[in-house]
Image (spheres, grey):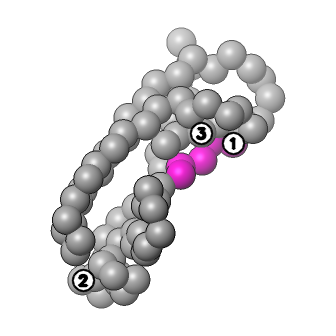
Amino acid sequence: MLLQDATVNCLAAFYVQTASGDVEYLRLNHEILATTLSATTFKINAGNGSAGTTTINGEAGSRTLGGKFNSYMLVREIMA
């Protein structure tokens, strides 16, 4: 889920269900109009729907491929 500031509802979300141990490559795109001059905070919320381990850039709580996977959030401000 993509969240902004203290807003309760997410801006964008997706759902993927996989078998244990599967590797998934995920991408979330969202465009939003800048409606304020104040600073804003974007957050990504990712995790398991139930108890268990969710691993980013690895598998079963361990890194994969020497930790060379890349996770990031790119925010671009474009002036009209």
Label 1: how many Cα within 10 Å (few below 14, some 14–19, many 20+): few
SS assignment at label 2: helix
Q: Is residue 37 above or below residue 48?
A: above
Q: Where is residue 42 drawn, in percent x and y?
A: 62, 42
N-terminal label among 1 and 3: 3
For the view shown, which residue lies furthest in the right direction? 38
N-terminal label among 2 and 3: 3
SS assignment at label 3: strand
Q: Quarter of the image holding residue 58? A: bottom left
Tell me what residue is drawn at x 53 percent, y 12 percent. Answer: 80
* Circle nearer the viewer, 1 or 3: 3
CB within 8 Å, label 2 to label 3? no
* Circle nearer the viewer, 2 or 3: 3
**In the rendered structure, which segment of residues is drawn in magenta?**
41-45
Amino acid type, label 1: Thr
For mark 1, what is the residue?
Answer: 41
Left or right of 66? Residue 12 is right
Tell me what residue is drawn at x 61 percent, y 31 percent. Answer: 9
In space, the residues marked 2 and 1 are separated at their CA atoms by 31 Å
For mark 3, what is the residue?
Answer: 3
- 43 falls in the magenta region: yes
Amino acid type, label 3: Leu
Amino acid type, label 2: Leu
For mark 2, what is the residue?
Answer: 65
Q: Can I make out residue 23 in this image?
A: yes
SS assignment at label 1: loop
Q: Is residue 25 above or below residue 67?
A: above
